[in-house]
Amino acid sequence: MGPFESVKACAGLVAALYKQSKGAVDHLHGVFLATEMERIVRLGITGHRGLSTAVERLIRDALDAELQKHDMAELCGVSCIADGPDAWFAEAVLARGGRIEVVVPAEQYRDGLPMSHHAAYDTLLERAAETHHTGIRESTSQAHMAGSEILVGLIDSLIAVWDGEPARGYGGTADVVGYARRMGVPVRVVWPEGATRS
């Protein structure tokens, strides 16, 4: 074998080794990313709206206590960010350094929320790492339940700010809790002593 052939053979060997090592690196990178994704705990929220200021304080404290159980670097909160527990939870997750994903039940969902909540809703939506949509236009009870079903499908466990009573309308908190349990998603009910609904 002449000098040229030797160099050519060495170059071929180097190229083969590079290709082999690059494949191994790419594989390890993929494994690392998959492991990182597996480490993320996805925690969802559902709860009653229209709670009093006094009950809000109790619920916010209870949500903070729940979040203290988690490493925020490994937590993703999933919420529809409606006024009440949905938004309080999302705000608490972000305040602690976690990230949120938002489920939008309908294109007209924001329009059906109180005007006083629009600014908070917009801020939370802007800060969402990812947004999920049902594809439904009108903000109906059916759309809200569809959004909750998507939420349940995304999470590892659900926090329910629930008084234990049946839903007052289709798609209410009790319906979401029932759906989560049927899907095998663990539910942690949060309803502080002394809290009441009007």
Image (spheres, rainbow, N blue to C red):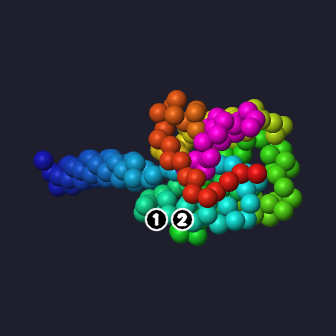
Which of the 4 image quarters holds residue 90? bottom right
Q: Residues within 10 Å of mark 1 (few under 14, many from 20)?
A: few
Q: Residue furthest front?
A: 194
* Mark 2 and mark 1: Cα distance apart in space: 6 Å
Q: Nearer the viewer, residue 15 or 31?
A: 31
What residue appears at the point 17 percent right and 52 percent down from the top-left corner? 6
- Residue 131 percent coordinates (x, y): 66, 49
Relative to 105, say whether 111 is above or below: below
* Three-letter amino acid code at the position of disc 2: Asp
x 50%, y 47%: residue: 188
Q: What is the secondary structure assignment of the residue under circle 2?
A: helix
Q: Nearer the viewer, residue 16 or 20?
A: 20
The residue that appears at 61% across and 50% down in the rendered structure is 161
Q: Which residue is mark 2?
A: 64
Tell me: residue 156, above or below residue 179: below
Residue hosting label 1: 68
Mark 2–mark 1 CB contact (< 8 Å): yes
Callout 2 environment at 10 Å: few (<14), some (14 to 19), or many (20+)?
Answer: some
Using residue 33 as the reference point, say whether residue 43 is left or right of it: right
Report the span colored magenta. Answer: 159-176
Residue 184 is situated, as x and y percent measured from the top left of the image, at 47, 33
Q: Where is residue 169 shown, x and y percent of the image? A: 75, 35
